[in-house]
Image: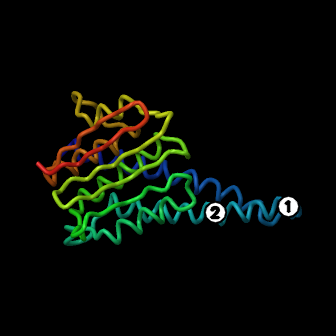
Amino acid sequence: MAGTLQLLQTLNARVCHDLAGSIGIIDNCLDLLDTKDKSISQKAKSLVNTESGNLVKKIKIFRSVYGRSDGEKEMSAVYLTKLMKDFFDGNGIKPKLYFEDGVIFLDAHIAKASICLTILASENIHSNGTIDLFFSKDNVIKIIANDRNLNLRKDNLDVLKRSGKIPITVNNCREHYVNILCDKSAYDLIFDEKEDSFRFSLVRR
């Protein structure tokens, strides 16, 4: 119970941290909207519009990934695709999702884990990198990130690999959360790394 409470508290801190950037920019720009310098006012207005949109996208995906609805057991492939498309809209990295014929709904926990892993992958590659997600009928999900210059944090990967008992921190709480989601749905997370790519595989036990 103590570990679950700690994870919840740390995830909340992480969410607040991720939202703080957009909120801070909006707050600073609001003070500049009424300035007499029109060029500054126009730039401030443009930034407010951009960051407001980013804030809405973040809140929407965080609610879907970290929240829970009554009776939630599945997430539709259509909803997952739209959620990812909206979140990464305007981002240099646009994940592509491929669903094998017959895959209409996904286990809710594993859908959330897939979103988390995709966001984590996007933070570890450059804007010219690519991310592809493959959903198969045999309960296997593959998330493949390609980039010539990968930037993977070993301590975060160690959590996903379950390399010993690693304390929960703001920097690795999402990885701990993914592990719990996998355990809840009886999935194993397999990580493979090559020189210019890495792959997360979620496989039903």
Please report the residue visible at 46 percent of the width from the left and 47 percent of the height from the top.
122
**Mark identifier at residue 50:** 2
Please report the residue visible at 22 percent of the width from the left and 42 percent of the height from the top.
3
Which residue is outermost to the left?
Answer: 205
Left or right of 50: which side holds 11?
left
Total labels: the figure holds 2
Which image quadrant is residue 165 in? top left
Left or right of 43: which side holds 137?
left
Label 1: few (<14), some (14–19) or many (≥20) C-alpha neighbours in 10 Å: few
Which image quadrant is residue 146 in? top left
Q: Amino acid at mark 1?
A: Ser
Please report the residue visible at 50 percent of the width from the left and 45 percent of the height from the top.
129
127 lies above or below 65: above
Helix, strand or loop at label 1? It is helix
Q: Nearer the viewer, residue 181 or 4?
A: 181
**Mark identifier at residue 39:** 1
Q: Amino acid at mark 2?
A: Thr
